[in-house]
Image: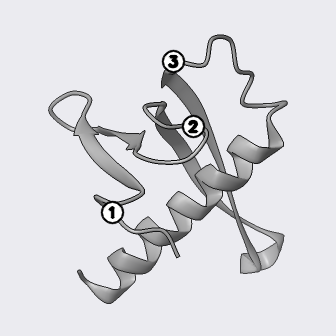
Amino acid sequence: MLLENTHYEFIPADENNWHVRILDGYYIETVIEFGKLKVADGGEHLTYDFSIISTPLGNIDPDEDTDLQEYAGMILSSILEKSVEGK
């Protein structure tokens, strides 16, 4: 599991929203924003979208970069787990 302030951190986007900065690995210093979360397949799955706010890696297409999609999913999973645990 990824850890806040080790693998990613929250940074303010505006008064109501937050972005996520990746702190390690290939996508270090890439900043992403999660969009809508949706429950799919009768509650069996959660779907999400995200966009890249900034990255030092040049042009990355989040729809094509499956490694980034997987990493963003791991971050989201960590965020949701912490939320459920109340930490």
Q: For mark 3, give the secondary structure.
A: loop
Indicate the quadrant where residue 83 lies.
bottom left
82 over 74 or under it: above or below: below
Mark 3 / mark 1, whichever is N-terminal: 1
* Disc 3 packing (10 Å; few <14; some 14–19; many ≥20): few
Kind of residue at badge 2: Tyr
Dot 3 amino acid type: Pro
- 38 horizontally vs 2: left or right: right
- Pointer 3 and pointer 1: residues touching (CB < 8 Å)? no
Looking at the image, which residue sits at the far front?
A: 25
Q: Position of residue 47 (x, y in %)?
A: 70, 57
Residue at (77, 80) in percent of width and height: 44
User: Residue 85's image quarter?
Assistant: bottom left
Depth-wise, is mark 2 or mark 1 nearer the camera?
2
Residue lying farthest to the top in this orientation: 58
Q: Which residue is mark 1?
A: 4
Q: Residue at x 55, y 26 (%)?
A: 52
